[in-house]
Amino acid sequence: MTLGVEEEYMLLDADTFDLVQRSESILRAEGDGEFSALVSPELFESLVEFHTPVCRDVAAVERELRRLRAHAVGAAGVHGLRLGSAGTHPFSLFEAQRVTGRERYRALVDELQYAARRELIFGLHVHVAVDDPDRAIRLIGALEPHICELVALSANSPFWRGNPTGFASCRHLIFSAFPRSGPPPRFRSYAEFAEVVGQLVAAGCIDDYTRIWWDLRPHPRLGTIEVRVMDAVSRVDDAVALAAYVQALVRRHAAADEDGEPLAAQHPVLTHENKWRAARYGLEATVVDVARGGPAPIARVIERTLDELAPHARELGCDRELDGVRRILRDGNGADRQLRVYAANGDAVEVVQDIATVTQAV
């Protein structure tokens, strides 16, 4: 149940708040310093990824995220830049972005073409260590009904190319053009997963399993379940709360699995439908409530999940951090905040200014 968290940050011009192509400057400046192993490039030169080391608990995640953000803000400031964290940049255009000059990313664009060039999106990924590969596969299946909850709580991308999209998280629409994305398929065992991945590698479809971009995936090299479905969030408190939610979800279903209880299953059609509705409506979504039957407001589903997670959060020592999810339900997610800022003057630049201010408040 140890954790790791990855955040993808936008590099912003301090005056215009447009994206700027300066990731290599940040990476070179890190050199062999304290944070060099915790920062990495991404597809475009206008973003960098910072990730925590392995953390024993969510309290450690919070300390590391605050330390990383403070360092990243300072590193950007040295180059006259601002830092931002959101699922999309509200007005920057993907056509203006430079692909990072590394073979991995050039090969990705060569293969995926327009789908890759358009992928100007930013995510929050949470890893939770699991002690057995077959259990990891079972837990991923059990987590699928919660995908919509994680989408609604983290939704932070209501804008694209300068305009409101009508979606709380349009990032999911953009990323859906990628192959091997979206909710994961069901596997009976880790051996079946490994066999399928092996067939993809042997056929030349992928280099390795990291070219599989499902919302939830096993990460064998790290021994974790990786939850990839969330938008990058602006508030560090939200990132901490979501890490606690993910860890408690994994622990809840792992405890049931250890006791030999059958884990909950959900038809893929319902998983896809609920995810779409969460991306469209955010915390105002009505979803198919499989546990109770019929429709339900997603906020009520999340509140019920929080009640179920309470004993597991106490066991893990993350009950205080998990309370942050109730704050998101009360105050709104990042998309709600962006749209409130935009409503004042209809100015997407003001939205990015606010994103930068909130991101840097560590």
Image: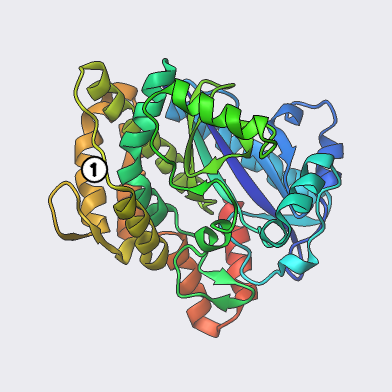
Residue 81 visible in the snapshot: yes
Q: Quadrant of residue 146?
A: top left
Please give the name of the residue rendered at 71% of the width and 36% of the height, measured from the top-left corner: 39
Depth order, front residue of 60/264: 264
How far from the left and from the top, in percent, is residue 109? 76, 52
Against 284, residue 36 (above or below) is above
Badge 1: residue crowd in 10 Å (few <14, some 14–19, many ≥20): some
Q: Quadrant of residue 244?
A: top left
Residue at label 1? 305
Q: Quadrant of the C terminus?
A: top right
Please, what secondary structure does the residue beneath circle 1 have? helix
Amino acid type at mark 1 = Thr
Q: Count of labels shown?
A: 1
Q: Quadrant of the N terminus?
A: top left
Depth order, front residue of 358/325: 325
How far from the left and from the top, in percent, is residue 288? 23, 57
Please give the name of the residue rendered at 75% of the width and 26% of the height, measured from the top-left corner: 34
Against 64, residue 12 (above or below) is below
How far from the left and from the top, in percent, is residue 302? 26, 49
Q: Is residue 221 left or right of residue 34?
A: left
Depth order, front residue of 323/145: 145
How far from the left and from the top, in percent, is residue 106? 81, 48
Please give the name of the residue rendered at 44% of the width and 53% of the height, measured from the top-left corner: 154
Q: Is residue 343 left or right of residue 314?
A: right
